[in-house]
Amino acid sequence: MNMGANENLIERVKELSCLYEISSLFQSQDHQDPQIILEKITHVLKKAWRHPNAAYVEINALKHHLKTDEIPVNTVHQSCDISLFKKRAGEIKVHYPIPQFQSSDFLEEEQKLLNKVAHEVSIFLEKIEQQKKEEWLQRSAQRNDRLAILGEITAGIAHELNTPLGNMLGFAEFIEEKTTDPSIKRDSKKIIDAAIFSREVVKKLMFFACEMPQNREHINIKPVVEQALSLLGQNFKKAEVSVKLIAKEDIEAQIDSIQLTQVLFNLLINAIYASPTNSKITCSLTQDEKNIYITIADQGKGIPDKYAKKVFDPFFTTKPVGEGSGLGLSVVHGIIKSHKGSITFSKNKPKGTVFKISIPKHHY
């Protein structure tokens, strides 16, 4: 459809106003949520089209899904892709309803405008994602620094506590063995139990601080996993929880088998603790050319989002006092890190948690 000179001028002014408004929105990005900015962009675009009262605008990119109004089922539209780091990440569409409008009602200049806006939105979202990545890296670096300092402190504490704890345990066992007084025997037993618990905490501190010696050898991983599951057989039985191992092939890697067993014990005991009766824990073992992967999935309540960033922090635990030291997952994290690997967790479906370990097959 042809336009007169006056109408043509009006459309050009609308396009320039649109670009100016959107540019102003991007400049205010430090003060607003991306969702709010993108929502405002949809309304700015709507005003820029030839028939604004009949136009529907939608933006779909990443987790953002916005539209000016409920879009009719049958429409004609103009669209342009939104790209993030050279990959398609969504699109912007401007719709007119059918049969009132046809594709010919769109202007070529409007498509050019849409292309410009999509390009600017792409740049805007790339900056947001880059900022998120930089913030994550900064937090990760800060956390590693804190862990390194804490590791040095805990290593010293562990060494200092080992000797007095050994003496306490030895004398308490001697008293329990020699006394015939029931009350003294009972009290000695309490001291022994407390000393053993404290010694286990010290051992975990030493694991966390990477003070335990490593003996990495090329081993078959499957028997180590099978042995860990076998040793915890009574724990599974008592909790009325079943376990399934998925390992289709023998997988070899250069790993300290004792430390790997420590990792498996910690993760499996946590999974058992979180699992309701008559549920199942699945342990799977896979590999690719460079890494082995161990996943442990339970069907418990899952990890609340508010605790997600604290899971691997030393001394953090959701267990009642006396039931956990808060060092189990820190130990796991430390051992995996010392093997140049990684450990992550995600939500299991429909419920529960999945921990995934990745360890390089070879240590160079």
Image: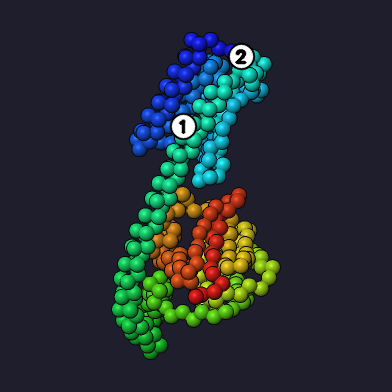
Name which residue lies at 46% across and 35% down.
120
Kind of residue at badge 1 = Leu
Kind of residue indicated by mark 2: Met
Residue 79 sits in which quadrant? top right
Q: Residue at x 40, y 51 (%)?
A: 134
Tell me how far mark 1 sits from mark 2, CA to CA. 31 Å
Coordinates of residue 147 in the picture (x, y in percent): 36, 65
Q: Are the residues at dot 1 and dot 2 in contact (C-beta closer than 8 Å)? A: no
Q: Nearer the viewer, residue 153 or 340?
A: 340
Position of the N terminus by quadrant = top right
Question: Which dot, 1 or 2, sits closer to the camera?
Answer: 2
Mark on residue 1? Answer: 2
- Residue in the image at 53% along x and 54% along y: 346
| 71 lies above or below 244 | above
Left or right: where 234 falls relative to 335 = right
Question: Between residues 57 and 15, which one lies in front from this camera angle?
Answer: 15
Q: Secondary structure at mark 2?
A: loop
Give the number of marks.
2
Residue 156 x %, y %:
31, 75
Q: Name the residue beneath numbered marker 1.
A: 38
Q: Position of residue 219 (x, y in %)?
A: 59, 78
Residue at (47, 22) in percent of width and height: 15
Colouring method of the image: rainbow
Helix or strand or loop: what does disc 1 sit on? helix
